[in-house]
Amino acid sequence: MTIKRIKYAILCLCLLVFGAAFIIRPEKYVASCAEGFALWAECVLPSLFPFMVISLIFIKTGIADRASLPLRPAARALNMPQNAAICFLLSICSGYPAGSRILSEFYESGALTREDCDKLAPLCSTSGPLFIIGSVGFKMFGDKLLGFEIFAAHALAVIIFSLIYCRFCKKSNPIPPKPIKSNNNVLYDSFYGAVISVAVAGGFIAFFYVVAEFMYDFNLFAPLEWVLKLFLDHSAAHAVCLGMAEVTTGCSYLARSSTPLKGALAGFMISFGGISILMQQLGYLTKTGVKPLKFIACKFVQAAMCFAFMLAVT
């Protein structure tokens, strides 16, 4: 209980300091919050919302469950839950944090167990092609081909890591999973769920955009930036530091740098997700019993693999 109280005291202190800084310098942080929402509206909303609606309709109508039937033998052979393939496809088409939301939907419906969600959490933690190729590659970096390369490296890192990870996990239950029940209000429920999820994502992005600026202003990134400057120029190191808090912000700043490692660094940040995306995903995954530290460690390994793959092709 004492440790829990200490954690809450530290959290309260951090929030009070952050709130005080926001009040003292509203001209800076209010503008930063607006920039965060603008970044969300331009780069994340168009790439996330349509696929989130489609994914929820597939899940709530039971189409996703039936579509996974032909893929279940392959999933069993790879020691994965029988809904693994369809969960992954819906995740990688939609992007963060849709995959975690999908696992939560399957878990709450009884189609996945806690053990299943633990296996699938790293596999269904992916960014989407519209964000990586369209928003990052084309809009930010002005290079659609680079976007394709980052997306391929990102997907490959997630798949390879998850295949290895599942081999060391407990064998999946061979009993067919419980099908998801549909209702008569699927369209409304799907749009409502998608709107709420995307709006929450926008709130996270705007909040952590401000947090990233706050951390940089108070030199909280100084140790990480000092290490990064041993290998990168100032602008790239600054971008990576911001990306550790909010990945869209980090990619936006990284696009302005001149480092030849910008593609590999973008792949690392996107695969890791940053604090903002990790918190969004854990908001869904903690309901399924996924352990936060274990999940974050998996994401870091995936990010390192994506970085290595990008170095090999650039």
Image (spheres, grey):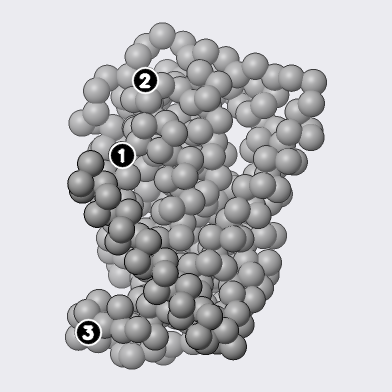
Element at badge 3? helix
Q: Of the numbered discs in the image, which one, if any, rests on residue 274?
A: none
Disc 3 residue type (three-letter): Trp
The Cα atoms of the two marked residues, 2 and 3, are separated by 46 Å
Q: Which residue is located at x 61 percent, y 82 percent?
A: 31
* Vertical placement of residue 86 versus 132, above or below: above
Q: Nearer the viewer, mark 2 or mark 3?
A: 3
SS for dot 1: loop
Q: CA distance from mark 3 to mark 1?
A: 31 Å
Q: Quadrant of residue 101?
A: top right
- Other residues around mark 2 within 10 Å, as few (<14) / some (14–19) / many (≥20): some
Q: Quadrant of the C terminus?
A: bottom left
Tell me: residue 310, above or below residue 107.
below
Dot 2 falls on a residue whose secondary structure is: helix
Task: Say whether residue 291 is visible.
Answer: yes
Residue picked out by circle 2 = 76
Residue 289 lies, in percent from the top left, at 36, 32
Q: Amino acid at mark 1?
A: Lys
Look at mark 1 in the image and give the residue it sits on.
291
Q: Earlier in the sequence, mark 3 or mark 1?
A: 3
Q: Residues within 10 Å of mark 3 (few under 14, many from 20)?
A: few
